[in-house]
Image (cartoon, rainbow, N blue to C red):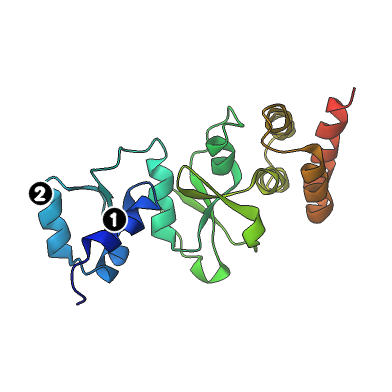
């Protein structure tokens, strides 16, 4: 077991809104017993089995999303309807956390809807410490996945109105993804033309 490195654990947690997984803590030299000790001492909060938060960090309103990311692995990204929620571009709350993962990580997890579509690094951003798909990718994903047209159009209009994305970025996404996503994005952009 490596030497216990509090600074290393802090750096891991800091990049994830204060949250970390047991497997990450192990790499910083923290055994399960040591994590349990620090939780009892009030330095850590056990969120769910295998996931903790350093108490120096406030609880996040996205705690369920951090838990989902930590449970699904290091290359996971919040996506689809959950990403719409992070950007505050929907009134519809998903019943599951949507996460896009590499094809090799497609194990089922309760409360998490896994998507295994390829994702480019340019389609990932960080928001409040969460790895999340960019706005154009998010809109294309929910449109392609069958979200009601009115919700997709609403998301397009709100994203443009709030300066989260420009029409040209959405046109590029429309061309890249095609199909239902292209049709709905085109309709939403036409609706906004004066």
Question: In percent of the image, x 10 and y 56: which residue is there?
Answer: 37
Question: Is residue 180 at all visible to an observer of this figure?
Answer: no
Q: Position of residue 108 (x, y in %)?
A: 45, 60
Question: In percent of the image, x 31 and y 38: which residue is there?
Answer: 59
- Classify 52 as above or below 117: above
Residue furthest to the bottom in view is 1
Q: Is residue 68 left or right of residue 124?
A: left
| Residue bearing the label numbered 1 | 10
Q: Which quadrant, please, contains the C terminus?
A: top right
Q: At numbered mark 2, what does the secondary structure look like: helix, strand or loop?
A: helix
Q: At numbered mark 1, what does the secondary structure look like: helix, strand or loop?
A: helix
| Residue bearing the label numbered 2 | 40
Question: Is residue 135 at all visible to an observer of this figure?
Answer: yes
Which class describes the residues within 10 Å of circle 1: few (<14), some (14-19), or many (20+)?
A: some
Question: In percent of the image, x 81 and y 49: which residue is there?
Answer: 172
Residue nearer the viewer, 92 or 69: 69
Question: In percent of the image, x 50 and y 59: which residue is there?
Answer: 76
Of the two numbered discs 2 and 1 on the same chain, state the one appearing first in sequence.
1
Q: Is residue 74 left or right of residue 154?
A: left
- Classify 159 as above or below 138: above
Residue furthest to the right in view is 194
Residue nearer the viewer, 11 or 178: 11
Q: Is residue 110 left or right of residue 8?
A: right
Circles 2 and 1: CB distance less than 8 Å?
A: no
Q: Position of residue 12 (x, y in %)?
A: 35, 58
Q: Is residue 11 left or right of residue 54?
A: right
- Classify 25 as above or below 1: above
Q: How far apart are the two marked residues, 2 and 1, measured between alpha carbons?
A: 18 Å
Residue furthest to the top in view is 194
């Amino acid at each position: 077991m490596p030497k216990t490195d509090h600074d290393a654990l802090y750096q891991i947690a800091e990049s994830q809104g204060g949250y970390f997984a047991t497997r990450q803590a192990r790499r910083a030299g923290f055994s399960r017993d040591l994590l349990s000790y620090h939780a009892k001492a009030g330095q850590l909060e056990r969120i769910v089995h295998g996931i903790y938060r350093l108490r120096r960090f406030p609880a996040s309103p996205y705690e369920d999303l951090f838990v989902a990311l930590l449970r699904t692995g290091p290359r996971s990204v919040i996506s689809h309807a959950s990403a719409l929620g992070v950007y505050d571009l929907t009134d519809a709350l998903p019943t599951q956390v949507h996460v896009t993962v590499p094809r090799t990580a497609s194990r089922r997890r309760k409360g998490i809807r896994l998507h295994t579509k390829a994702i480019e690094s340019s389609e990932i951003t960080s928001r409040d410490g969460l790895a999340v798909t960019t706005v154009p990718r998010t809109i294309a994903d929910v449109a392609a996945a069958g979200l009601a047209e009115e919700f997709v159009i609403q998301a397009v209009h709100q994203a443009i109105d709030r300066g989260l994305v420009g029409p040209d970025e959405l046109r590029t996404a429309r061309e890249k993804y095609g199909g239902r996503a292209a049709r709905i994005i085109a309709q939403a952009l036409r609706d906004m033309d004066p």
